[in-house]
Amino acid sequence: MKYLEKTLLILMVIVFISCNNRSEKKLEQLTVDEVEAQSNFDSLKYSLKRNVTFNQLSTSTNSILLTGIDKIRLLTIYKINQNRDKNIGFEEGTTFYNDSEAKDKEGLFNYFMPGIDIINGYNMINIGHYDLEKEKLSYLFQKPVLIKTLYFPGIKSDSLNGKPIKRNFFMVSVYDEDTNKDSLINNKDLRKIYHFDEINSKKTALIPVQYSAIRSTYDYKNDIYYIYTKYDSNKNGFADKTEPISIFWLKLTEPLNVKKMI
């Protein structure tokens, strides 16, 4: 009898553990499904169909960005759900530069880099460029893209090494090509950084075609912008974890003079 009770107890424990494991696996699977469902619901935060046009998308332009170039204003253009109210605002703001040594020597910079403000993308698919003097509207991109970060001259006065500083250009970190050939443009593709001149007459890629920007830093001692990249050595159109890192740099006083450090 004791043997039977012991056997039943062992069987109950096995059943309990088995059920518990199945529950955990089910819970884990549900969590993955929920993430995928959320990604699909908000898919345009992460992807666009390769050949999509602006006419095929529902967009909203609700914000005018004041820039440090008095005659130039920027319009942020977002992809939104087709049935969503277009008369809404989008969160935009300044990123602060928080280097403690810079605070002590220069005071607190208002911007990510002196004289340059930024906003992050989140469904931003284009930027309108408006010249108030010429009453002319143009666009930074001619087809829908996924904008990661927009850099633009800040409206507030700023200084570096005790001297006033103003910028007269724009930069955009963006996914604009289906480099991995999966029919979508998203953060699995190579990320580019472009420079635009003051009047939006010229667009210049700051890193070579086969590189993908992964992060950036600022050297306030030399007013240098460092771009960390991954080199797509296997040419699969994706920045693999094992691929080498290369660093490019440019002085913000000469943003088109880009040099490779390593």
Image (cartoon, rainbow, N blue to C red):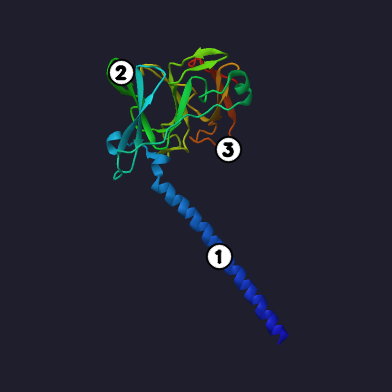
Amino acid carrying mark 3 in the image: Lys
Q: CA distance from mark 2 to mark 3?
A: 45 Å
Circle 1 residue: 22
Amino acid carrying mark 2 in the image: Leu
Amino acid carrying mark 1 in the image: Arg
Q: Nearer the viewer, residue 251 or 114?
A: 114
Horizontal side of 79 relative to 232 (left or right) equals: left
Mark 2 vs mark 3, foreground winner is: 2
Circle 3 residue: 241
Circle 2 residue: 132
Horizontal side of 196 relative to 133 (left or right) equals: right
Q: CA distance from mark 3 to mark 1?
A: 33 Å
At which x and y percent is residue 125? 37, 33
Query: Vertically, is 99 above or below 222?
Result: below
Q: Nearer the viewer, residue 58 or 202?
A: 58
Horizontal side of 9 relative to 260 (left or right) equals: right
Q: Secondary structure at mark 3?
A: loop
Q: Is residue 220 visible?
A: no
Mark 2 vs mark 1, foreground winner is: 2
Please report whichever mark, 3 or 1, sits nearer to the chain's N-terminal start.
Answer: 1
**Residue at x 72% of width, y 83% of height:** 3
